[in-house]
Image: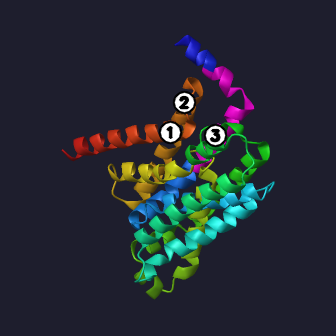
Amino acid sequence: MGEVITKLITYLGRPFVQYALIVGILIALCSALLGVILVLKRFSYIGDGLSHAAFGIMSVAAVLNLTNDMMLILPGTVICAVLLLNTRKNRKINGDAAIAMVSVVSLAFGYLIVNLFSSSANLAGDVCSTLFGSVSILTLKPFEVWVCIVLSVVMVAVFIFFYNRIFALTFDEDFSRVTGTKVDIYSLLISVMIAVVIVLAMNLVGSLLISALVIFPALSSMRLFRSFKAVTICSAVLSVVCSFIGIIIAILTGTPVGSTIVAVQAVAFALCCLAGKVCVK
């Protein structure tokens, strides 16, 4: 036990671990806040669709050898988020079908483009890291950390400032529109925030595991609480704690960070389900 503590203290003193913890906690917080909205609006799987879209755009950026691929990935993901969240107004294509199409097409074209044009000597490793977030969270640069901090602070501030409108929009969009709330503007705002979180989370858990980061905290909290505010707060706390534990375990044991965080989230969900049943009884 003493060796583990010594090893942990040693790692915590290293910048790359500090960067990983800062970014991981901030992304977990933002993901949890937006995850409650998405679960309640029956749009839980949008994280998968957008993460796969981001993977496709990232493949294009890699082929173009862009030094700052965020300039292409973020706007492209925002556009996809707006289109997907507006599919509920389309009677010909429902939201689930649109998300499925975007997921499959983006993954297929992204992998195809990388195979055809990439000059990387370790193509399989690059793709695996992007899809599962193997080590990218442990290779962050100071600039990337500061970008994550700024974007996360802005998103949390926006969520708190517009909390009442977001609450109303989540539960009854038609009523919000009747009362004079500019529904389209706030829907666009939520779409942009979701896209930003997805792009940031790709470094933490990878494209294929982002949905877990968004959904698990909200579902776990709903097993314990019923009010929107309580669920939101509990979701944020639970997500931050699970991400912190997951990163620490991954660093100490050498397991993939993204998969470890999702495993911790799954255990937390099981414990919350058990606690919810015990409390009900």
Q: Are marks 2 and 1 in contact (CB under 8 Å)?
A: yes
> Circle 3 is placed at which residue position?
125
- For the residues labelled 1 and 3, the Cα–Cα distance comes to 16 Å
User: Dot 1: few (<14), some (14–19), or many (≥20) neighbours within 10 Å?
Assistant: many
Residue 130's spot in the image, x, y percent?
61, 47
> Circle 2 is placed at which residue position?
255
> Circle 1 is placed at which residue position?
259
Q: 280 and 71: which one is in front?
A: 71
Discs 1/3, front: 3
Residue kind at label 1, given as amino acid type: Ser
Q: Residue at x 45, y 37 (%)?
A: 264
In the rendered image, the residue lying farthest to the right is: 67
Q: Relative to residue 42, is residue 125 depicted above or below?
A: above
Q: Residue at x 81, y 54 (%)?
A: 67
In the rendered image, the residue lying farthest to the front is: 116
Q: Are marks 1 and 3 in contact (CB under 8 Å)?
A: no
Discs 2/3, front: 3
User: Dot 3: few (<14), some (14–19), or many (≥20) neighbours within 10 Å?
Assistant: few
What secondary structure predominates along the stretch shown in magenta? helix
Residue 22's spot in the image, x, y percent?
65, 41
Q: Secondary structure at mark 2?
A: loop
Residue 25's spot in the image, x, y percent?
59, 44
Residue 153's spot in the image, x, y percent?
66, 55
